[in-house]
Image: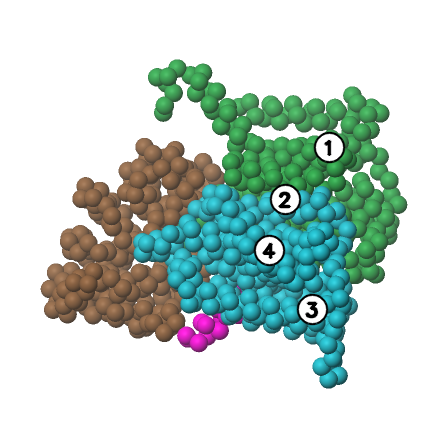
Chain colours: A cyan, B brown, C green
Amino acid sequence: MSYGLALIYGVLKVINLANAGFLMLGAYVTWWMWSTWHVEPLLAPLVIVPLFFGVGFLIEKFLVRRVLGQEPIVSLLLLFGLWLVLQNLAYTLFTGDTRSIETPFIDSSVHLGPIQIAWPRIYVFVAGVLALVALQTLLTRTQLGRAIRAVAQDRDAAKITGIDVDRVMGIAFGLGIALTGFAGSLLSLLFSFNPDFGRTLLLKSFCIIVLGGLDSFVGVAFGALALALAEAFGVRYMAASLQNLISFVVLVVVLVAFPKGIAGMIRSLRRA
Amino acid sequence: MSDVILSGRGLTKRFGGLVAVREVDIDVPRGEIFGLIGPNGAGKSTLFRLVAGIMAPSAGTVMFDGHPLTKKSPAAICVDGVVATHQIVRPFRTMSVLDNVTIGAFFGRRPQPKGREHARAIATEVLERCGIADRAQKPARELNLAGQKRLEIARALATDPKVILLDEVLAGLNPTETDRTLDLIRSIRAGGTTIVMVEHNLRAVRGLCSHLMVLVEGRKVAEGLPDAVLADPTVIAAYLGTSVHA
Amino acid sequence: MRKPIVFAAILFAAIAFPFVAPGAEYAIDVVFLILLYGTMSAGWNIVGGFAGQVSFGHAAFLGIGAYTTGILAQHSVPLPVAFLVSGSLAAIFSLLIGIPCFRLTGPYFSIATIGIGEATRLIALNWNGLTGGASGITLSVTLPIVTQYFLALGLCAVVVLATIWIQRSRFGFALAAVRADPDAAETLGVNTTIAKTQALFVSAFILGCAGSIYALHYLFISPDSVFGFSTAIALVIMPIIGGLGTVTGPLIGAVIYTAIREQLEANFQNLDLLAFGLLLMAIVLYEPKGVLGAYQRFANRKKRVASTPAAAPR
């Protein structure tokens, strides 16, 4: 999800609060397909990724593009509105009950020496890493990826060199949403969820992005690691219910201390 | 140089590995029009921002009337009497032209105006000086480029500066507009305000400035009276050398 | 100069209302809620509208005000004292978060405020000794609804007068400059950090006082009610519906918000937020100046039609 956010922000310079909504929807679509049609949850991303990509592309085309030239706060509010719509649509369709997915695979685990690891965790980890590698390859090795990065750096210059900037922005937004839906689908294997699912995670992924710097992908991975460590250590010293607080505190501290993110800080240190 | 109002010593600015300005000393004489010229990418605008206090130098100090400016906030520097215009115009787009200038009058002056009407009166007077009083009620975004550049100058003037720094205020203007702006700059100087200007238009600079400084690749290469500086072989070489690429 | 007369008339009508409608508890209750929400909305507008710093964390100030009154009332502190302490604590808290957060600009500030709002909710939820945790605080004082009504009316009037003053003062110019272009404002001598911090301080004080009234009205406060996300959303939505950075816009927004919520909440759960989300999107896309902006455009068109064609363009 953090990658989805970072991609959208980097290319469009728009902060997408609606991502929390799509994350939640990703989880719900997975659950819904499993409970109505008995679709194996592990296969759900095959549907979700293209579907969400299409939805994201259309949202960019019909909503976001209209406010792109305006102050950043306008698009922030627009997507905030979209998030409210998605969240409460889910409340209406799926009720506020907490859902979870249970299949034999999900309950299985493997013994690695003294530690027991649940299979789904391994699966999610591997899938996450694969998605990251795929995204990185897409961005660095393909023509489309180069176009996306060019638009992220300088929209006007990209336009001059003949890149179809509008299409690239639509694709980037679609990719961002698709990644988020993918993340939601994966997370539904690990956690139970309700329509408010995305909110805490949204804050966490902002925290991660801020830690890593808003347009650096390696930074995002680094930020995720840092936050996970902070939470793991924090839990030792305080109540588990305060775990979520840690990410907010980290968020605020980092935003204030290093507005460019840790990656930005390291970069500027290296230069100086 | 008898009376220096604004001076910099050993000013250096690095952006990562790139050194934009390298150990430049600058002395702006009181009451004069000081021109800062150089080919594209010479570090003029960077030096300008350092001197105006908008950007902090990596090394060196800036003194204004004997007091250090480095480390003060841009707002405090403005109140002290040093104000800069933006190279790319930045009016408060939705506000009226008058309100734009009123903000300068309200916040940049010492002593403060006695109230809204007083600040408005100052602003109106400045607009008349700058020749845009007829458009006072228009939203700033409706002015053309020449008008917006004038508005930049008017806003700065309303703060009652001792030194005003102008960043390429002539760029993009047609000959008539250029002449009117040159007249305005002369009248600002006649009012006792020192002027520092970054400029590309060498012909305008030659006729206007009393003192020139040339920057090439972040270093000062020449300084002095305009005619002498512009005849300097290193300056000519620098300009010819880069104008081919430009 | 018709405006002062209109304001006076509305104020007079509001004062007279409980006397002409005795026994109409429900009607008084609804107007009371509109006044309370109008106050909150106008308070938010000082930071979000005038200074252009959209905050999703203002529920924190409301919550601090409500909890302060709740806790002080438990210890039998006189209510007027509790009321003022509530506002003051919220204002002091605003300094604590304003000083770091205002180093951030635009969207970054907004994100940080989501974190602030969520963090205060979690603290209220977990600090059992002080806040009663998830079970909240129940107040044992009862104020007659008419007293509550006048308290809300008074606060609302103060806020409206304060916003009118801000709009015309040097402070208002500073906030307008901050909203339009903080960097340019700074080079013209506006100390943007101080201006924003002052705006947040005033805004937080108002919300703290509103929180106090909230506690006295509902007599029960829990982390999810006052610090909850839907409260934070309401605070953002009302001024945007009505018209950001205006005096009357936030009040109009409060009327519309309360009306829609009263209708939908009773009948369809969650549809209210769905509707507000759609409304928010529609306003951002089509009418960024809110209902007030739409009204002004409509009025202008009418005026243009009425005047003779020769006199119309200026």
Q: Is the same chain shared between marks 4 and 2?
A: yes
Of the numbered discs 4 and 2, the one sitting upstream in the chain is: 4
Foreground of the two, B116 or B97: B97
Q: Amino acid at mark 1?
A: Gln
Q: Is residue C88 left or right of residue C198?
A: right
**Mark pair 4, 3: CA separation:** 19 Å
Read off the residue under disc 4: A47
Q: Is the same chain shared between marks 1 and 2?
A: no
Position above or below: B69 against B189 = below
Residue B109 seen in the current view: no
Q: Nearer the viewer, mark 1 or mark 4?
A: 4
**Mark pair 3, 2: CA separation:** 31 Å
Magenta region: which residues?
A258-272
Q: Residue at x 59, y 51 (%)?
A: A18
Read off the residue under disc 2: A85
Q: Amino acid at mark 3?
A: Pro
Position above or below: C238 against A201 = above
